[in-house]
Image (cartoon, rainbow, N blue to C red):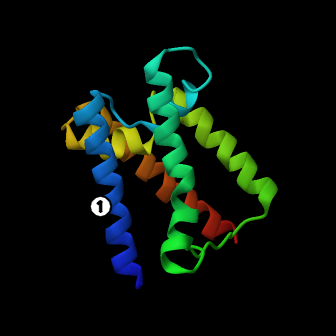
């Protein structure tokens, strides 16, 4: 499968899952919020959240079963750097009251001004980080 087709298919599946969670459950698919609530006793809601997160984790193995090949991944940084980056992203999602999935996918689709501000901040920070890393390299 070429890059454009796999990107299109992945985007379509993300959009479908976000739309279904909103239509069937009345919930926004903000992954950081779903993961943060996994340890809390909230009745049926915790099981729906757990099933959604399990579906995300099951994506690569299902892809491998369907295509016969594991999705290609390329790490451009050592694992300790990736771990620190992951912690910083987690901190940022709590600070920004949401993540790229909640703001970027669901929030922009709802025409949320707050989500637009968050996404512009995410993109600007990402572009600045890349520019700084390239300047230092």
Residue count near mark 1 (Cα–Cα under 10 Å), binned few <14, some 14–19, many ≥20: few
121, above or below 36, in the image: below
Q: Position of residue 100 (x, y in %)?
A: 42, 45
Q: Is residue 96 visible?
A: no
When asked about the image quadrant of residue 112, the answer is top left
Q: Quadrant of the N terminus?
A: bottom left
**Helix, strand or loop under label 1:** helix
| Horizontal side, residue 87 vs residue 16: left or right | right
Q: Residue at x 62, y 72 (%)?
A: 73
| Horizontal side, residue 121 vs residue 75: left or right | left
85, above or below 71, in the image: above
Q: Residue at x 50, y 24 (%)?
A: 46
Nearer to me, 111 or 12 = 12
132, above or below 118, in the image: below
Q: Position of residue 30 (x, y in %)?
A: 42, 36
Nearer to me, 69 or 8 = 69
Q: Residue at x 49, y 48 (%)?
A: 55
Q: Is residue 90 visible?
A: yes
Check disc 1 and report the residue beneath it: 12
Work out which residue is located at the far left of the displayed protein and give it.
Answer: 111
Q: Position of residue 137 (x, y in %)?
A: 70, 72
Nearer to me, 69 or 94 = 69
């Amino acid at each position: 499968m070429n890059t454009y087709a796999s990107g299109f298919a992945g985007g379509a599946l993300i959009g479908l899952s976000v739309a279904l969670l909103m239509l069937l459950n009345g919930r926004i698919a903000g992954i950081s919020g779903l993961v943060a609530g996994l340890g809390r006793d909230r009745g049926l809601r915790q099981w729906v959240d757990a099933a959604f997160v399990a579906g995300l984790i099951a994506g690569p193995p299902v892809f491998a079963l369907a295509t016969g090949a594991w999705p290609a991944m390329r790490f451009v940084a050592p694992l300790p750097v990736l771990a620190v980056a992951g912690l910083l992203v987690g901190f940022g999602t709590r600070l920004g009251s949401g993540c790229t999935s909640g703001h970027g996918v669901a929030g922009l689709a709802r025409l949320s001004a707050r989500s637009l501000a968050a996404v512009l901040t995410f993109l600007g920070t990402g572009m600045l980080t890349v520019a700084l890393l390239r300047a230092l390299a």
